[in-house]
Image (tube, helix red, strand yellow):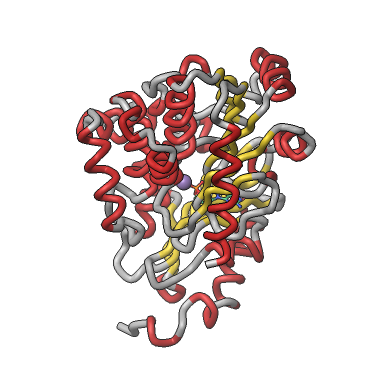
Amino acid sequence: SAAEIILMEALDSFKKELSSPKKIFITTHVKPDADALGSSLGLANYLLKKGHSVTVVTPTDYPSFLTWMKGNETVLDFSNPNDKDLAISRLEEAEMIFCLDFSVLGRVNELGELIRNSKAYVVNIDHHQDPEDFADFRYWSTKAAATCELVYELIVELGDKDAIDKDIAECLYSGIMTDTGGFRHPNTTKNVHLVVADLIDKGADCSQISNWIYDSNSVNRLKFIGFAITHRLIVRVDLHTAYFAISKKDLKKYQSQTGDTEGLVNYALSLDGIKIAALFSEREDGIKISFRSSSDVAVNKFAASYFNGGGHKNAAGGKSDLSLKETVDLFESLIEKCQDELFPAETITVH
Ligand code: 5GP
Ligand code: MN
């Protein structure tokens, strides 16, 4: 395809850029998940090994169940006043900027405009739909399950498969594990298993990583999940839809930490007959929304059209500036209105 031709031409210029030691700035999307942080630190550890100087900057903080990754303690949080000045100076002196696991500059808040105006060589490695054209080199495919899968392939493309050590393998494994929902989503391809097999070969310990990421709940978090399922789940069987609406007060009551609502939306999708699930959580800066859908229904266009968001076919997100109540009312009416687009007639089974 055309994209592949452009890619191959740009690949030469990219390889040339990396052929001498560079000052490199790596960033990823707000509220980084395992794929965002794992791809950033996996790549950072590789580039450090190759003799570059590397700074990883996240636009916000991230969940504590990711802090075991190698290099975590060197990550600068742009939203933290203690880190911001250093992050800006690292961005200003950077010769290369890597943008990982996002493809529209709006996903990195204030950093977006700084990157747009930078003179550095910009690289975008990502697997989200509809990328914005801001990079000098884009290593992008929506066929990839995770950005970590693409980082692995890029390292192989650079002829450095042997440079992938245990630390790098563990970072990359994490993002592939979580972005495939623990190797369960439709994006769990043969290639995913081949890549993961090699990462295991390089030393990634699957059960240890799964334990760090999935089995490190606080008591508050587990009780919060129980509360949300019991008191905050709305099921609209008639619309094949179920959702959670979580208020600021709810989050406060359970002393919610960054990452504590992650995965909650999947409980709504796990219901028999439910094809669309959503989680609305009331944050300082408005309502944050997560959408999930069964494999035959797409939610990314819905998120983009009505909730200022986007994402993948079966996992998308968005935001709303309305109140929590107004947002869920709007959501219900839109789901009702969009039945034909969301559920092509043949996919609906009437019980
Ligand atoms: P999550 O629900 O886990 O926060 O996000 C699910 C997916 O939707 C991720 O791939 C994420 O990149 C995308 N996503 C989440 N929030 C937004 C948003 O506000 N804008 C866009 N464009 N994508 C989002
Ligand atoms: Mn991802």
**Residue beneath the point at 30% across and 51% down:** 192
Q: Relative to 203, is 267 on the left or the right?
A: right
**Residue beneath the point at 53% across and 20% down:** 52
Report if residue 263 is visible in the image: no
Give the image location of residue 144, x and y in percent: 42, 54
Report if residue 147 is visible in the image: yes
Give the image location of residue 57, x and y in percent: 59, 26
**Residue beneath the point at 55% across and 46% down:** 11
Count every numbered label the image shows and give the total: 0
Which sits in the foreground, 202 or 298?
202
**Residue beneath the point at 33% across and 35% down:** 161
Which sits in the foreground, 148 or 64?
148
Q: Quadrant of residue 118?
A: top right
Give the image location of residue 343, x and y in percent: 46, 78
Q: Quadrant of residue 30?
A: top right
**Residue furthest right as drawn:** 117
